[in-house]
Image (spheres, rainbow, N blue to C red):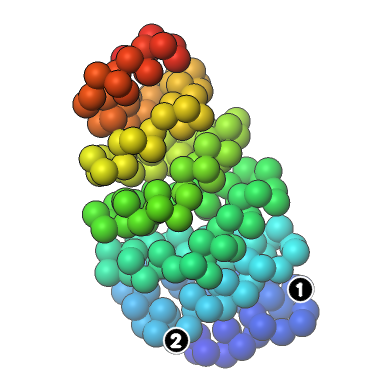
Amino acid sequence: GVGAIMHLAGRNDLQVQLQSAAALRDISSNGDFQLAIKDCGVIGIAIELACQPEIELKILAMGILRHLSVAMNLKKELLSSAIMDVLSECVESSNSEALLFECASFIANLAEHAQNKVALVQIGILHLLISISKHDCVKVKQNSARAFALISSAPSNHDNFVGSVLDALIGLLQCQEEETCKNTAAAIVNIATSNEISARIGNLGGIY
C-alpha cells in the first residue's frame, strides 16, 4: 500500500527512491486519494525528498506537493515553514525547467486560497516569483503570471507590487504568450488602483 511505498521512498537507494517518489506523485494526482495520502504522511516524505541533492528527486517531490495543492482543503496546510524552506531552496539552487514549473504551479495553486494571498507575501514569495518568472520556459512564465495575478487580487498586497516586482511583470508581458500576458495584465489592473502605483507603472514601461 501507500505506507510501503513511503517506506521505500526513505531507502538509501536512489533508484528505489525515484521509483517510489514517482508512484507517490502519481497517486497524489488523484483527487480521490489526496486526503488519505496526506493523512499517511506523504507531505513529510515529500519534504525529505525535496531536500535531497538529486534534481530528479526534487522534481518528483515538488510534483507531489503541486498535486496536493490542487485540493482546496489542503492549500492552507501546505503553506508551512518547512515547505516554504524547501521551495526556496529548490528555486535558488537550480535552473531546471521541470523543477521551476513545479514550484511556480505550486505557488499559484496555494494563492487560490483567499487567506494564503497575504500570507505568501508576508513570507517573501514575491522574491521567489521574480526569480522564477525570468526563466524562458513558457509554462513556467504562465504559472508565474497566474501566481502574480492571484496574489495581487488582495488589496493589502498592492503596496508590495513596486520596484523589482513591477519589473518582473513588465518582463512577463514581453514574452507575448497569450495566457501569460492575460494573467500579467490582470495583475497590473489589480494593483493600479492608486495614483502612485499607476504613475510607477507608467514610468517603468508605459504599459498601463
Residue 4, quarter of picture: bottom right
Q: Earlier in the sequence, mark 1 or mark 2?
A: 1
| Residue 53, image x, y percentages | 75, 64
Give the total number of marks visible in the rendering.
2
| Residue 5, image x, y percentages | 58, 84
Q: Which residue does the numbered mark 2 point to in the structure image?
A: 40
Amino acid type at circle 1 is Leu
Whether residue 188 sits left or right of residue 89 in the image: it is left
Q: Residue at x 33, y 66 (%)?
A: 76
| Residue 175, image x, y percentages | 50, 21
Crowd rating for badge 1 (residues with CA inside 10 Å; few <14, some 14–19, many 20+): some
Amino acid type at circle 2 is Cys
Q: Quadrant of the C terminus?
A: top left
Q: Residue at x 45, y 55 (%)?
A: 123
Q: Secondary structure at mark 2?
A: loop
Q: Residue at x 28, y 30 (%)?
A: 191
Crowd rating for badge 2 (residues with CA inside 10 Å; few <14, some 14–19, many 20+): some
Q: Nearer the viewer, residue 25 or 167?
A: 167
Residue 183 makes an appearance in the image: no
Residue 106, quarter of picture: bottom left
The circle on residue 173 is none
Note whether 207 is above or below 110 in the view shown: above
Measured in 3D between alpha carbons, the distance from the residue under mark 1 to the one under mark 2, in whole angstroms, is 22 Å
Whether residue 195 sits left or right of residue 49 in the image: it is left
Note whether 27 is above or below 125 in the view shown: below
Q: Secondary structure at mark 1?
A: helix
Residue 10 makes an appearance in the image: yes
The circle on residue 14 is 1
Whether residue 85 sits left or right of residue 180 in the image: it is right
